[in-house]
Amino acid sequence: MSTTSDLNKSNVIKFFDQVFNHGNMDIVDALISPSYQFNGVPTSAADTKAWATGLRTKFPDLHFSIETILAEDDKVALRWRMTCTDNGKPVYNLGTNILVMVGGQAISNDQGGGDTFKPA
């Protein structure tokens, strides 16, 4: 694996852990490019922070685990599991993301899945 692959993989892991699991929004500006797009839609760092904060507010026990992650040069692919409590019941959600990184920052992020809770 290249140094670029290692850096990009590390930054994606850091984003999921720090932003979603610990609520550290301070790193978003460093890890998302000003030209970032989520599922093809231009999305600012401020938009990302607001969305992540809203998710953490709705689900205070939110936790993301990365089950598989692969990186090759400027691309990172991962499968994740989100666990939380919804309406008093433990639930989980699965999804995949494919990111393109430039200079250690995400410029695009295409997500599949992650839209249906399943009982834990």
Image (cartoon, rainbow, N blue to C red):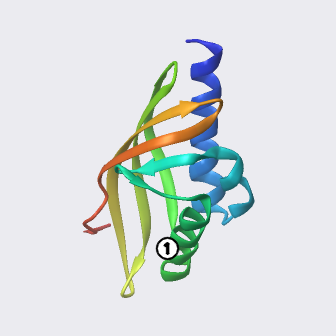
Q: Residue at x 57, y 61 (%)?
A: 20
The quarter of the rendered structure image containing the C terminus is: bottom left
Percent coordinates x, y for residue 38 in the rendering: 41, 52
Label 1 SS: helix
Residue type, numbered disc 1: Leu
Q: Which residue is mark 1?
A: 55
Whether 94 is drawn above or below 117: the answer is: above
Of residues 6 and 91, the one nearer the viewer is 6
Please state if 71 lies on the left or on the right of 24 as rendered: left
Quadrant of the image occupied by residue 52: bottom right
Whether 46 is drawn above or below 113: the answer is: below
Of residues 113 and 33, the one nearer the viewer is 33
Crowdedness near tag 1: few (<14), some (14–19) or many (≥20) residues, C-alpha within 10 Å:
few
Q: Residue at x 64, y 33 (%)?
A: 104
Residue 83 visible to the viewer: yes
Whether 74 is drawn above or below 100: the answer is: above
Of residues 73 and 59, the one nearer the viewer is 73
Residue 61 visible to the viewer: no
The quarter of the rendered structure image containing the N terminus is: top right
